[in-house]
């Protein structure tokens, strides 16, 4: 499940920008020098690997073990091009180092925010509601339509 969430978040982050890996040269009709345009840096392998590593660090911090639903929380991970979070991650306050988790998520979100702005990323604007959480069979999980997933 952790790998699926990691893959979906990484896919949503990279799908909003161009996948073109070639440089384009733009020239004007005047005697100016050509300008090279590089593809958005968010899709460069080093950047994608760095983002994937940051997501893995977040996943490694998350613990789901719980005794009651009050121990279950969510954190917004990733920044949508239109604002708001691109996904939410459930965790248990019982065994998760919450301060470290929030710091890693904040760093990741800041990178995404800068990349979105730098690359002028656009996407479909949809509001993702934060899910409700519950402790079911001693594991934090999310609720959808009042049903535990």
Image (cartoon, helix red, strand yellow):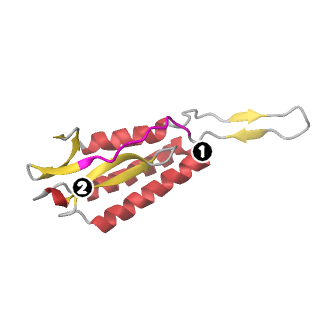
Quadrant in which residue 119 is drawn: top right
Q: Quadrant of the N terminus?
A: top left
Near mark 1 (Cα within 10 A), the count class, few <14, some 14-19 or many ≥20, is some
- Secondary structure of the residue carrying numbered label 1: loop
- The structure residue drawn at horizontal position 49% and vertical position 38%, both measured from the top left corner, is 125
- The percent position of residue 122, horizontal first and vertical second, equals 56, 38
Which of marks 1 and 2 precedes in the sequence? 2
- Residue furthest to the front in view is 146
Which of the pair 77/53 is nearer the observer? 77
Corner quadrant of residue 12: top left
Answer above or below: position of 84 versus 17: below
Region in magenta: 122-132
Q: Nearer the viewer, residue 135 or 89?
A: 135
Q: Would residue 47 appear left or right of 30 to someone viewing this image?
A: left
**Where is mark 2, residue-wise?**
91
State which quadrant residue 63 falls in.
bottom left
The vertical placement of 76 against 43, above or below, is below
Q: Which mark is residue 119?
A: 1
What distance separates the C-alpha of mark 2 from that of mark 1? 31 Å
User: Could you tell whether 127 is left or right of 97 in the image?
Assistant: right
Q: How many discs mark residues in the rendered view?
A: 2
SS class of the residue under badge 2? strand
Residue 126 within the segment the image draws in magenta: yes
* Residue at the (59%, 49%) spot, across then down: 117
Rendered location of residue 91, percent (x, y): 24, 55
User: Residue 10: x and y, percent?
Assistant: 40, 42
Residue 143 x, y percent position in the rendering: 21, 43
Does the segment drawn in magenta span residue 141? no
């Amino acid at each position: 499940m952790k790998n699926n969430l990691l893959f979906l978040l990484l896919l949503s982050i990279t799908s909003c920008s161009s996948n073109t890996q070639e440089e384009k040269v733009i020239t004007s009709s005047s005697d100016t020098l050509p300008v090279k345009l590089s593809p958005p840096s968010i899709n460069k392998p080093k950047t994608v690997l760095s983002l994937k590593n940051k997501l893995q660090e977040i996943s490694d911090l998350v613990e789901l073990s719980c005794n009651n639903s009050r121990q279950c929380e969510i954190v917004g991970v990733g920044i949508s091009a239109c604002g708001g979070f691109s996904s939410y991650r459930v965790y248990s306050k019982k065994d998760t180092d919450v301060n470290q988790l929030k710091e890693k998520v904040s760093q990741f979100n800041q990178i995404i925010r800068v990349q979105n702005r730098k690359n002028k990323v656009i996407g479909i604007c949809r509001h993702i509601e934060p899910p409700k959480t519950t402790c079911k069979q001693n594991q934090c999980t999310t609720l959808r339509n009042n049903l535990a997933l």
